Image (cartoon, helix red, strand yellow):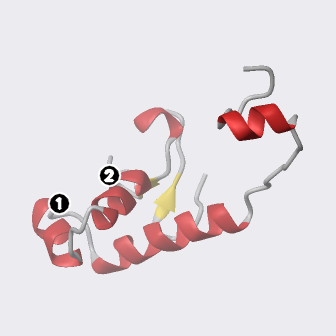
Amino acid sequence: MTINDRVEINPKIMLGKPVIRGTRITVELVVRKLSEGAKEEDLLNAYPHLKVEDIRAALAYAADSLAHEEVILYRTGASNVEAGNSVPGR
């Protein structure tokens, strides 16, 4: 499945994780490296098949994924919240 012209999902590549088309470079890897302080130039040097447009497409895909994420909030008992438990009954 093509997400945009640079990101694709194929169950036969990286277990279906979103990757840069024609590579095994995952969107997750690109976003993680940038979050750890890597510069675009660092990624381009480390992954010669990667282009600046690929990095931007990976970020756009990640942003779109978050924008369409459905968050369901539910109230738990006060004791769970006060105890810092995020799973009801724990």
Q: In the rendering, at what x and y percent does residue 76 appear? A: 86, 37
Q: In the rendering, at what x and y percent does residue 51 appear? A: 27, 74
Write down the quadrant of residue 48 in the picture. bottom left
**Crowding at mark 1 (Cα within 10 Å: few <14, some 14-19, many 20+):** few
On screen, residue 12 versus residue 54, left or right, reads right
On screen, residue 25 versus residue 38, left or right, reads right
Which residue is at the front of the view, 81 or 11? 81
Quadrant containing the C terminus is top right
Judged from this view, the residue extending furthest toward the left is 45
Q: What is the number of callouts on the image?
A: 2
Q: Secondary structure at mark 2?
A: loop
On screen, residue 58 versus residue 29, left or right, reads right
Residue pictured at 46% horizontal, 71% vertical: 59
Q: Secondary structure at mark 1?
A: loop
Indicate which disc, 1 or 2, sits on the residue closer to the N terminus. 2
The numbered dot on residue 47 is 1
Amino acid type at mark 2: Ile
Write down the quadrant of residue 56 in the picture. bottom left
Residue pictured at 79% horizontal, 54% vertical: 71
Residue pictured at 51% horizontal, 71% vertical: 5
Q: CA distance from mark 1 to mark 2?
A: 8 Å
Q: Are marks 1 and 2 in contact (CB under 8 Å)?
A: yes
Amino acid type at mark 1: Tyr
The numbered dot on residue 36 is none
Q: In the rendering, at what x and y percent does residue 47 appear? A: 17, 60
Which residue is at the front of the view, 5 or 83? 83
Circle 2 sits on which residue?
A: 25
On screen, residue 59 versus residue 69, left or right, reads left
